[in-house]
Structures are given as structure tokens and as C-alpha cells.
Image (cartoon, rainbow, N blue to C red):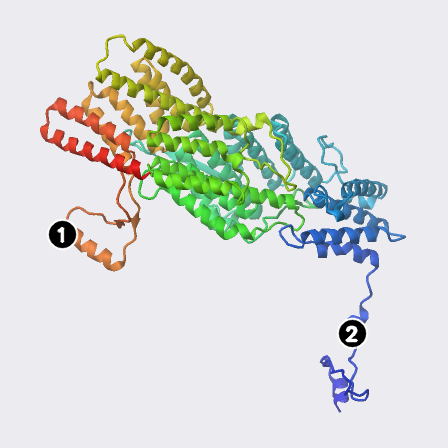
Amino acid sequence: MNEDRVGEDINPRPQKRQRRDSSSSPETTVAAAPSPVASNLRPLPPAILLLSLPSILLHPPTHRNHALSLCLSLLALRRCLSLPDLDRDIECRAWTALAEIGMIVIDGGYEATGEEWAAGVGVEVEKAVTKALLIAQKHQSLQWLRLISHSSQQPSLASPTYQPYTIYSAHLHLIGLHIHTSDHSNAVACAVRLHTTALAQGWTDEAILLAQVVHLRVLVHFGVWEDVDGILQQVEGALGMEFESQKNSNADDAETGSQVTVQTPVGLGAQKITVEGLGTVKTMLAIHTLLLGVVYHTYAGSAEKTNTRLKLLHELLDGGALNLEGDGHIQIYLAPNTPCLHFSPTPPVVFYALAFLATSAAKRDPVGRNPKRRVFAVEGLNVMKRWEREILVPIYSSRREVVIIEDSMRNIRADLECEMIGLSILRNELASAHQLILNLTSTLRPPTHNIFPSYASRVSLHCAHLAHARGDVDTARKWYRVARQCAARSTPDEPTTDVTNQAKPVDDADANRHDRWVAACAWIGEICLRIGVIRQRTTIESQEELPDGCADVEREREWDALRAEGEEAVKECDGLGGALRSVAGVVRACLSQEVLAAKHYLKKSLTQATQAQDNYLRGLVLALISAYYLHTSPEHASAMLQAAEQLGAGLGAAKRKQMSQSQSQSQSQGQSQESEGPASGVPSEKDRVGNGPLRIWVGERFLELYRRAGDEGKIRKQLETNRRLKKAVETEAKEG
């Protein structure tokens, strides 16, 4: 009866699996009906099955079975090629796949480390490439499988046999090779040739934009800053971004406002760049262009242009421009009816962390209760803790690429910690800075990491600045000289070891190019230290009333030697961006023997510091300029001294903690009765002195003005203020 019902059913259910044991009899066992789908399947030919196995077995390099998957893939392809009577297309595909898997093995360092299963892979890859080329050349239908050797030879761009993606890929690999070998001229020339080829061949807008971004990236990498601005404007214009500056109508106001205007590209219906409007490829190119623009304008010292790009960059990132759960792999269509270019830009997690680092470095203003420089540095470290263990890469990546990503994340973490150290020193938080230096040093050294040689110059410079802030002259001088020596021998932006743990040779020119900033900072810092020592000794000698001419000759010789060395130091700083250019102007003013020249240098440095929103340097320059107006224009000097005092005090402002709703209501009731009091919160800790030495110096100048005016009330108040400042500075020095 059951059998009749099953036979009558149009869609019969599959039979249940019957229990098979000793108690079952043949009569009670019901055989399963064969599946109609399974009956139509035919077994795959061995060649096709073996050729398909690598795509099934292969795991990304972050997987624990990555090496095993490579080994099995090689075995499958070797077994496929050993079969007799292979079709030409199957054989060509097998040789090509063997070459690809072999290059992943070589790039991962398995052959170099002596893995038994990877022995002789290099020779096998060369043989596979040769065999595949011979087969592809003899059969017209296999022309698309032809490989092009990524060597230093320029491919024939006029040859019709090369597909657009082949030409593009060859140029990208060639540019990467020139960057790796620090070949500046050839790298730039190859990037320009790629852009010219894209225009001449009539490729898509995305292909042309990618070539422009690659050109911009090469210029920034090699520091060809004089050519960056023009290319940057072209790329921003092609992406539909236009940045306009609106100056404040008040000429006396030092701050300027800025507004970003985004032109609508063709085909977009909104007046604002969005992820949906640009598409995946253009969004990726837009965020890379914005980040490069932030780096360039931070280097040039233009905070206004930097902030407009940072605002748009974070809007795109907050809008989901980066998929942090993906591997970043994208496809770019170069021309109609041609294969697309598979492209893997900076991994999303790395770029996200890099955006926080660039933002922290661009926010130069250390004044306030919660400086943005610290906010973005702390948030960047938190983001890295959440994502660095879940980095995804394409399945065809090698272990070396994973090592590069890990090195990038490790270096970004160290750079963020350096930003926090620098900010703590600027804000005179010496105990915190000392602890951060110890934490950074322990992170850079084994067993955590082994990259301390790459950061030795920067750590030494932080130690010099810390000792300088404490007033330890001898220790600061030693650390400055150590930083200069380390800067001439290290390469901070490249790992010192590869996947085989073998030491990499350091190119002297490349090391000097990258550590040139650290060496210049250490040099100019030592010059400033020596200027302060000589000035302090001169003041002491004048108070001791030594005989006339007793130390004048020796002091003049010392000044002459310092001026000669200082002139060389400031010339080195002039070509290293807006920040060091401003510092160089201050040093020139301190070494100048002419009042007008010194005032000119200081005013120029003040303008540059204001444009960069570097309020730490701005307060120092205002104090120095005021010294020239103490006798000629007391009102003007008093205004500048007051501004310097506010900036110095702002460096010690403590962060406010959030209040509960009941506390906020009680405070608002209290403020209705009293005219003074904080409105947004209460200090989480007591406000610190800030820039204590600057505030003490400013207080002494105020005292001179009050004594000259004969205001006894202000004199007594200023004397008490100066006494409290000196006591607070001594207390913080002991704590630090």
C-alpha cells in the first residue's frame, strides 16, 4: 500500500535511511530509490578535477592551514601535468596555475626558509612560465593567457597583443619595484607614462583616475613637494571636489574660516559626495586622495586646507566608505569588452588606523582641556585593538603581504604613541611623558616586537625634549646628539627583517631621506638649548658684576661659533615643511644682531604658526616679539603678553568630566545666583601650570610694566602670582 502511494506521488519524498544491523532481515530492508539528479551526473575527468582543486583547497595566508593548502595545490597541479594526452587549454591553464601558486610560495618565503615541500619551486616556476608561453603563442585562442614578465623592461605599449589589464598591471608592478629600490626618477617617469597611456588608449575614467592617484602617491612618497600641489588639484577636480577658503572680513582676527564646496560629478544627483554616489572605485580613490592632501597641507603648514579635507575624509569614513570586514579587493574596468583589473589597495583596517594617525598629526593645537591630537591618537589605538586581529586579505595573497600589513599596523601603533608623547611634553605633563616613553620602548623591544632600531632616533629625540623641558641641560644635550647619530643610520619606515627573519640592507640615501626630519629637529633643538645656556650664563655674570671685559671676549667667540652652526641648522630646516620653517625663523631671530631683522623673522614665524594653528609655538613667538615693544609701545606689548599667558595657561587645562543630570540641575541653579562658574562640567583633576617657564617669563615682563607705571596694587598681585607659579613649576618638576 505504501509502495502504491509512493508510485502515485508526483514529488516523492526521499526514503528514510533504514537501520542496518544483525536483527534486520533482507525482507524488511527497503532499498533507497536512486536520485534522478545523481543518475544524470557524470564523473569529472581527472585533469579537470585536479586543475580545479587549488581553487577549492587554497586558504588565505592568515589561515593556519595556508601552507598545507599550498602544498596540496602544488601536488594536484603536478599530478595533473603528469597525465597523458592533455588538451592544450588544460595544459596551459595547469602550467599557469602552477606558476601562480609557485610565486605565492616564493613570495611567502617558504623556499628560502628550507621547507621540504617547497624545495625547487623557483626552478619549477620558471619552467611553468616558459611552457605556458610556448603553448599560448602557438594557439590563437589562448592569447589571453599570455604572461608578461614583470622586469625593468618597458612593455611595447603599441602592441595589440597585450590586454589593457596586462599593461596596467605591468606598470603598477614596475612602479612598485622602483619604489622598493628608491629609484625616484624612474618611478615618477613610469607613473607619468601610465597616465599618458591611459589617456591615449581611451580607457575608462576610473582607470585614468587610478593612474593620477598613483602618480600623486609616488610624488608624496619621494617628497617631491613642489609637484604635489598641481597633481593634487587635478585629481581633486577629477573627483568633483573643490575647496574654497573664505577669509574673515576682520583683518585683526588671526583665525580664518573655511568652507568646502563639492561639485557634482557627471551623473550624480546630490551636491555632496556620498559613498552611493561615487561608487566603490571612486570612493576608494577619493579617500586616498583626501589622505594624501591632508599629509601635503600638514607638511606645508596650512591648517585651513588640512581641516577642510579632514572633515570630508571623516564624513566618507563615517558613511561606510571602508568595509572593515572585507579584504579591500576591488575590480576596475579599463576598457569595454576586456577583462577587468583586480586591484588590492591599502587594506581597510590599515587605512582606517592610518586616517586616525594622519588626523592626530594634523591637529597641531595642544591648547585646551581635551586636545584633538590626543583624542584621535587614543581612538586610533582603540580601533587597532578591535580590528588588528581580524585582518582579512585576498585568498591569492602571500605570507609576505600579511607581514607587510602587520608591520604597517605595528608602525602606526608606535607612531600614535609618539604623538601622545609629544603632546604630553608640550603640555608639561612630564611624568606622563616619561611613562609613555617607557611603554613605547618596551613595545618596540623583544619579545613584543623587534623594531627598536627603526625608532631609536625618534625615541632619543623624545628623551631629549623631556630632559630639555625638565631643565636638565647635560642630559638633553647628550640625547640630542644621540638622536642625530641614530637618524643617520636607521630607516624608520621599513621593516628591518623580512618573512625569513633575515636582516635587510639599509640604503644610506633612503635612510637619510626618511630620518632627515629627526636629524634636523635634534640639531635645531640643541642649538636652542645652547642659546638658552649662554643667555642664562650672561644674566648670572651681569648680576655678579664681574670686571668689564672679563668674559666678553670668550662669550663673543662662543656666540660666533653658535651663529655659524645655527645658520647651517636653519638652512636644513627651511626645506622641511612649514613647522620646521617656523622654528628656523625663531632661531634666526635669536641669533640675529639686528633688531629689525629679528622682528622680521619673528613676525614671519608668527604668521606661519598662526596658519598652522600651532598655538604652542605661537605663544613663544608672541612673548619674544613683546620684548621689542616693552619700552616703545607698552600697550602693544601688554596685549601680546596677555595672549602668550593665555596660551601658556591653556596647555595645563584639565579635562572636564561629565556631570549627572541632578548635578547639572544643581549647578544651573547655582549659576543663576552667581555670575561666575563653569557651565559644561567640572574639572576631573586640578588644572596644571601648563607652560610654566613661559608664564614665569611673561609674569616678570608684566612686573616690569607695572613698576614703570607705578601701580602698587598690580605690582603686589603680580609678585604673588609669580611666586605661586615658581612654586608650582618646582612641584611639577619634582613629580616629573
Q: In this image, 635 relative to 338: left or right? A: left
Q: Secondary structure at mark 2?
A: helix
Q: Amino acid at mark 2?
A: Pro
**Gap in angstroms between the C-alphas marked 1 and 2:** 89 Å
Image coordinates for residue 712, horizontal then vertical, percent: 9, 28
The reply to whether discs 1 and 2 touch (Cβ–Cβ < 8 Å) is: no
Q: Looking at this view, is 283 or 299 the one in front?
A: 299
Q: Secondary structure at mark 1?
A: helix
Q: Could you tell me which quadrant the C terminus lies in?
A: top left
Q: Residue furthest right?
A: 85
Q: Residue at x 76, y 82 (%)?
A: 20
Of labels 1 and 2, the one closer to you: 1
Q: Amino acid at mark 1?
A: Gln
**Height in image: 7 above or below 340?**
below
Q: Which residue is mark 1?
A: 673
Q: Residues within 10 Å of mark 1 (few under 14, many from 20)?
A: few
Image coordinates for residue 338, horizontal then vertical, percent: 71, 45
**Height in image: 317 above or below 580?**
below
Question: Does any portion of residue 344 appear in the rendered image?
Answer: no
Q: Which residue is mark 2?
A: 36
**Height in image: 166 above or below 575?**
below
Q: Residue at x 80, y 88 (%)?
A: 25
Image coordinates for residue 356, horizontal then vertical, percent: 46, 43
Image coordinates for residue 166, horizontal then vertical, percent: 71, 40
Q: Looking at this view, is 65 or 160 the one in front?
A: 65
* Among numbered discs 1 and 2, the one appearing first in the sequence: 2
Q: Residues within 10 Å of mark 2 (few under 14, many from 20)?
A: few
Q: Looking at this view, is 432 or 495 the one in front?
A: 432
Question: Does any portion of residue 408 appear in the rendered image?
Answer: yes
Q: Looking at this view, is 341 or 365 the one in front?
A: 365
